[in-house]
Image: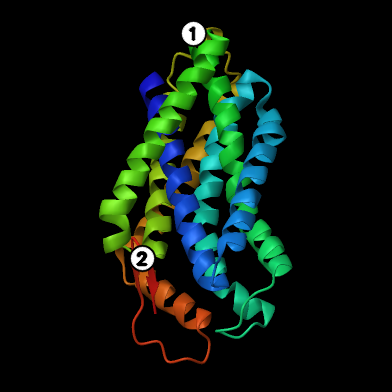
Amino acid sequence: MKKSLILALLLMGFTGTLAQVVLIRELLVTFYGNELSIGIILANWLILEAAGSFFLGRIAKKPERSVDAYVALQFAIAIFLPLAVYGARVVKTMLGIPPGEMVGLFPVFYSSLLLLAPLSLADGAKFTIGCRIYSNLTKEAAPSIARVYIYEAIGAVIGGVLLAFLIIPHFHSIEVALGVGGLNLISAILLIALFRKPFLPNLKARHRLDLNFLRRGPYFLLVGIILLASTGYVLLSPKADEIHNLSTQSQWQDFDLQYYQNSNYGNVA
């Protein structure tokens, strides 16, 4: 049980790094980003993460709600990350701004705020809720926060290394978003399964999980399996490339896009 939680915390850092870097890269391509654009996007990300940690983290103030809240946030990330990547590519088209035209600072601010909001809020809330779950398992409040932070940092480092040397050179952003979403769904399913062992009285006494979570577990598990199957189908079929091609062509509107490639240094289209 604790190992599945540690895996989820490592994945939290891994997901945060990949989501942040991929979305910032996509938004910079869309906005022809300069230092001001980068600053606005990063500020929005950090402010939204802080808001998610402070406000949404309170939805799981009671220990018995923490596991299902964490699982729900993993579901949300799996759903919204691919949508955010797609949205980052088509936002200029939605705003009626033609390719080649610079975007003003105010549209950069509110469009990036709206695109990043679901993911940043969920990522921030996951840290608070993860700390609560870990402290509930170990019965140590302050040390648990430090350990959760360490696990998240380790996951972030792993994500950064893999992103630079493996992921960016070989996978487009839609594939990355779907892959990260799939990993979060697998983690969520493991949490659901392992926190629903058949020792109900002992489980409730040791980990303060109420029977409501145990009753909700099958529904969470069913949703997780459906989402994972759908994500796996899109990722492993030509659908991922079709979505990628559709979004990049929409990004460049009436231009005849012949080539599109990401590298560690930027994007070539």
Q: Is residue 215 visible?
A: no
Residue 17, given in percent of the width and then of the height, sits at 44, 45
Q: Secondary structure at mark 2?
A: loop
Q: Which residue is identified by label 1?
A: 202
Q: Secondary structure at mark 1?
A: helix
Is the residue 127 above or below the residue 230 in the image? above
> At x 67% / y 83%, what residue is drawn?
96
Is the residue 142 above or below the residue 164 in the image? above
Quick one: 5 or 43, which is closer to the camera? 43
The amino acid beneath tag 1 is: Asn
Residue 13, given in percent of the width and then of the height, sits at 44, 37
Quick one: 266 or 186, which is closer to the camera? 266
> Which residue is most to the front?
35
67 left or right of 266?
right
Task: Say few, some or many: other residues with alpha carbon within 10 Å of mark 1 (under 14 / 14 to 19 / 20 or more).
Answer: few
> At x 56% / y 74%, what residue is drawn?
90
> At x 53% / y 7%, what residue is drawn?
139
3 left or right of 86?
left
Is the residue 167 above or below the residue 263 in the image? above
The amino acid beneath tag 2 is: His
Q: Gap in Å between the C-alphas at discs 2 and 1?
A: 46 Å
Instruction: State the scheme by which the image is colored.
Output: rainbow
> At x 47% / y 39%, what residue is drawn?
221
